[in-house]
């Protein structure tokens, strides 16, 4: 007898999750593009872009080392649901502020902190889910699906946002974003993500938590090639962010 017979599992579950991730990412990037236009029209300042970006990325950098260890101790499905819910609520708050003509730069900074924290938990959880719900033989295909969802959202969003901005405006784009979050929550609610069973008491100790949190850093130190790849990735990420800011 299989657990949760009414929920989708295996590769089918991953396909549904990737679809939800695709539309959720697309909605998020639509809103980011629209709000970037608003920031430029409102302030015309590159400093404002940098401040908002810092408020978004700082929580990701600070929380990520501990998020992975916490995700291993919590229900991964719950983490994904809460992450999407937090991101959706932040967009809803921005929509209310925008429609009442009260939106300010500092509001974007505050919601950026919330969104960055949610992403710090969301991405390692998605990565862990792949190895949880599919077999080893399907890892390659599964990782390809996840990468395709992320890449497709990034490729489609700018062109689609520019088109929608002239048709429905910033308010309409944020409404679309909220709808995509609801769709992502729906896709997560119909799939089965198994819980990981740990040795009783072992994962509850502070020692094991800190050990797991610094494991990634130790691995990079022990494998210099990984450290070089990590440094290159960070450099390219910062350079890409600079180029995006110059566009506005």
Image (cartoon, rainbow, N blue to C red):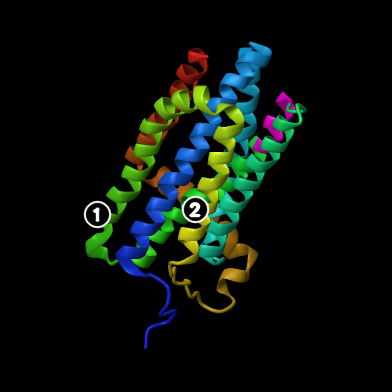
Q: Which residues are magenta?
A: 104-111
- Vertically, is 42 above or below 11? above
In the rendered image, residue 164 lying in the magenta stretch gets the answer no
Percent position of residue 29, x then y: 49, 34
Q: Position of residue 101 (x, y in %)?
A: 75, 26
Residue picked out by circle 2: 183
Q: Looking at the image, which residue sits at the far front?
A: 167
Classify residue 231 by image quadrant: top left
Q: Is residue 11 visible?
A: yes
Which of disc 2 and disc 1 is earlier in sequence?
A: 1
Q: What residue is drawn where x is 67% and y is 15%?
A: 42
Q: Determine whether the residue tagged by mark 2 lies in a helix, strand or loop.
A: helix
Task: Estimate the x, y position of residue 162 in percent, counting from the top left.
Answer: 46, 23
Q: Is residue 188 above or below residue 243?
A: below
Local crowd size for mark 2, using a 10 Å CA cut-off: few (<14), some (14–19), many (≥20): some
User: On the rendered structure, is 53 left or right of 150?
Assistant: right
Please rate how many residues cluster around mark 1, counting C-alpha atoms within 10 Å: few if below 14, some from 14 to 19, many from 20: few
Which residue corresponds to mark 1? 141
Where disc 1 sits, the SS reads helix
């Amino acid at each position: 007898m299989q657990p949760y017979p009414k929920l989708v599992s295996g590769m089918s579950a991953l396909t549904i999750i990737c679809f939800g991730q695709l539309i959720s990412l697309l909605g998020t990037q639509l809103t980011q593009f629209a709000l970037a236009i608003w920031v430029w029209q409102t302030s015309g300042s590159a400093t404002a872009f940098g401040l908002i970006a810092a408020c978004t990325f700082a929580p990701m950098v600070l929380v990520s080392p501990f998020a992975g260890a916490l995700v291993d101790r919590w229900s991964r499905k719950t983490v994904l649901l809460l992450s999407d819910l937090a991101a959706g609520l932040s967009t809803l708050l921005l929509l209310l502020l925008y429609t009442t003509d009260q939106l300010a730069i500092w509001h974007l900074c505050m919601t950026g902190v919330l969104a960055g924290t949610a992403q710090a938990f969301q991405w390692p959880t998605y990565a862990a889910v792949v190895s949880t719900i599919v077999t080893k033989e399907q890892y390659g295909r599964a990782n390809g699906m996840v990468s395709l969802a992320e890449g497709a959202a990034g490729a489609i969003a700018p062109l689609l946002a520019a088109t929608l901005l002239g048709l429905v405006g910033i308010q309409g784009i944020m409404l679309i974003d909220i709808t995509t979050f609801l769709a992502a929550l729906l896709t997560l609610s119909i799939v089965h993500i198994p819980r990981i069973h740990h040795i009783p008491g072992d994962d509850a100790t502070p020692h094991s938590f800190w050990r797991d949190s610094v494991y990634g850093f130790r691995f990079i130190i022990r494998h210099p090639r990984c450290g070089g790849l990590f440094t290159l990735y960070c450099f390219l990420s910062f350079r890409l962010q600079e180029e995006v800011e110059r566009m506005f």
